Image (cartoon, helix red, strand yellow):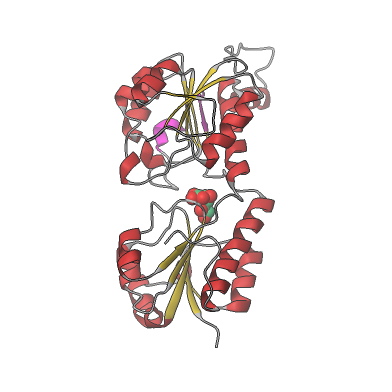
Amino acid sequence: MKPDVLLVGTMMPALEARLDEAFTVHRLAQAKNREAFLAEVGPRVRGIVTGGVTGASRSLMEALPALEIVAVNGIGTDAVDLDYARVHGIRVTTTPDVLTDDVADMAMALLLATARQICWGDRYVRAGLWGRQGLPLGRKVSGSKLGILGLGRIGRAIAHRAEGFGMEIAYTDVAEISGVSYRRIPALIDLAGWADILVIAASGGLQSHGIVNATVLDAIGPQGMLVNVARGSIIDEAALVAALLEKRLGAAGLDVFVDEPQVPEALWGLDHVVLQPHRASATLETRIAMGDLVLSNLAAHFAGRQPPTAVV
Ligand code: 8YV
């Protein structure tokens, strides 16, 4: 008998095919009526497979009385009710390490694209404006000051890349990170005031909700730049839109948003903003590696072994 699992959202077809081989997969995205669907299959479901953003809410887990494991295809657990999982003995697994390089690469790509106006320049050429109209100058990246909010695995991978650009690096984190030579600036507002570019690489969740607020954005200022590859919830999005519209913030490169896939329409027409549809881990190689980890975690759990990358 194959264990029943609930797939929240969709995954790459090759991974879904492998899930189908090993499990009886119920696809929440295909349910016409979510409540009726969960009432029917819910009692049989022993595992959830979900993304970092879709997660597993308390109400979803409550509808699954036989739930044993939530396998997140991502590193973030901010959308999983971890307290509920702990209290009910439900395992939670993630896919750490395999996505670190890609997310750091995307941070650098956004940083460069935003500072050097790569997408703007591309639009300008395609619109036939070259030779007919000017294009403002970009900002220098090499040798600039990079502030990193959150110096975990991804933050350190970003710092490592930034060293290659001769950037001066400082960070804000809840504690001093041992084994690194970068300067810790304990208060985010001071980091934002110091940095030319602030990159967000912290975890989402209550502790970071809205901490990049209007005051922090103003500290980055009209000459500064913000990059976010973490979670939209870390920024006060309304304040960010206002700061960009009013040019109180120089520019922004954003891969994540508060209510994905909704992106504030006010940002769509801004040339000093680079937008991505949450793609930091979206390479073929990394998505295969993430999928392998999701399957190994599930396989280990249902074979009675400790899943390799359990967080609960
Ligand atoms: C993924 C993410 O895009 O790792 C995370 O927490 O948000 C991203 O890597 C997402 O989990 C894919 O489902």
Toward the viewer: 75 or 151?
Answer: 151
Looking at the picture, how far across and down is residue 307, in whole percent? 53, 67
Toward the viewer: 32 or 83?
Answer: 83
Which residue range is magenta in the image? 264-274
Looking at the picture, how far across and down is residue 127, in whole percent? 64, 25
Residue 137: name its quadrant.
top right
| Residue 227 is one of the magenta-drawn residues | no
Residue at coordinates 59% horizontally, 24% vertically from top-left?
120
Residue 114: name its quadrant.
top right
Residue at coordinates 65% horizontally, 57% vertically from top-left?
289
Locate the C terminus by quadrant: bottom left
In the rendered view, would you say 281 is above or below 293?
A: above
Toward the viewer: 42 or 161?
Answer: 161
Looking at the picture, how far across and down is residue 192, in whole percent? 40, 21
Q: Residue furthest bottom?
A: 1
Tell me, yes or no, if residue 259 can be seen here. yes
Tell me, yes or no, if residue 123 can be seen here. no
Toward the viewer: 93 or 254?
Answer: 93
Left or right relative to 238: residue 145:
right
